[in-house]
Image (spheres, helix red, strand yellow):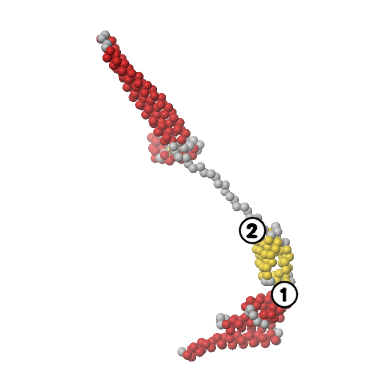
Amino acid sequence: MAHAQKKKDKVPDLIFKDAYRLFSEGRVLVRQKRYSEAVSKFQASYRVLNSEKPSHQIVRNALHLYIGRTFHLMKKYTKARDNYRQYLSLVKKGKRREKVEGWLASIAPHLSATVDLKSTPSAECEVKHPGGVWKGSSPAKIKVEAGEIKIRCEKEKYAPQRANLQITPHTSSTQNFILVLIPPKRIKPKIPVEAPKANRSWIGLVVAGAGVAALIGGGVVGFLASNDSQESAKQREALLQKGNMTIEDTRTIKELDQQAQNKAFIANILYASGGGLAITGIILYLVLRPSGKAASRATSKSIKKRDIHAFCSFVYQKKCRIIPPSYSNIHRIQLYP
């Protein structure tokens, strides 16, 4: 068990030794100016040190410096710059930082490039390049560092435009944007929808019904008044034939005549009010009932298909269908041949 643990502890040391061997071989190749082979050795050493052990991370960070310096000697300035900056981002302190910063500044002239930025119409643009960020209005000629360039231009009421460029040192690239106007949003006009009016035609029916009841009452009271008048006339005629009419008989006849007149007066009032109520009820019914499509739909729903078919079969001896009205409340019936 103890032997297995010791063997396990030795594994990281063997990895480190292997990485250090590759690193040493790379340094020898650099002195021999065999730069391509040296870069391969440094990169192999970097890959071997794949653990998170602090000692391994320190060596990996230093390898960025050696790889960058080797690319620098090979005049591959873009790759040299990337490794130098990777080293500076990982190593915050140390004497080598100043040396790396100096090397980075010395290769800056070899990384310059130009972007000729245009747009129709003129827009506010942002250009991100390895050396920083440029912001301004188009058209413009922008000095950038070679490498991957990200461009974005935007203008109010226009759709933003983007582009990614890969620019090599000492070259000029033109990027021309044509901004497309964003179409205005179509706002559908809100058409006010009138709420269906409540069907209050029943008020007219009630008023008309009251008028009909008054007319019937007037007829009944008029009939009683007529009977009283006839009874008074009969008694007066009978007494006149006897020739012995007393004061009491005269009073009775007058009372009967008065009752008949009162009932006739009441009957006339009932006739007049009943007629007025009936006419008013009819007018209210016509005014308050639903009109147009609402009325046609209500009427259409009230008519059952089976009733229509039965009617057509009975009257025309044919099948038919009902056609709802378009502009009036009149339904049409179409017969099938």
Q: Is residue 230 visible?
A: no
Coordinates of residue 71 in the picture (x, y in percent): 69, 79
Residue at image x 48%, y 91%? 3
Residue at image x 41%, y 31%? 208
Coordinates of residue 253 in the picture (x, y in percent): 30, 15
Residue at image x 68%, y 76%? 81
Per the image, the residue denoted by label 2 is: 159
> Farthest front residue?
247
- Looking at the image, residue 215 sits to the left or right of residue 18; the answer is left
Assess disc 2: are there few (<14), some (14-19) or many (≥20) residues with their C-alpha within 10 Å of its C-alpha.
some
Coordinates of residue 154 in the picture (x, y in percent): 66, 60
Q: Is residue 206 above or below residue 175?
A: above
Assess disc 1: are there few (<14), some (14-19) or many (≥20) residues with their C-alpha within 10 Å of its C-alpha.
some
Q: Tell me the kind of residue under disc 1.
A: Ala
Disc 2 on helix, strand or loop?
loop
Given this view, does label 2 or label 1 mark the residue nearer the observer? 1
Per the image, the residue denoted by label 1 is: 108
Residue 102 vs residue 16, the one in the foreground = 102
- Looking at the image, residue 293 sits to the left or right of residue 23; the answer is left
Q: Quadrant of residue 96?
A: bottom right
Quarter containing the C terminus: top left
> Farthest top residue?
243
Q: Which mark is residue 193?
A: none
Q: Mark 2 and mark 1: span between their CA atoms? A: 35 Å
Q: Tell me the kind of residue under disc 2.
A: Ala
Residue 211 vs residue 155, the one in the foreground = 211
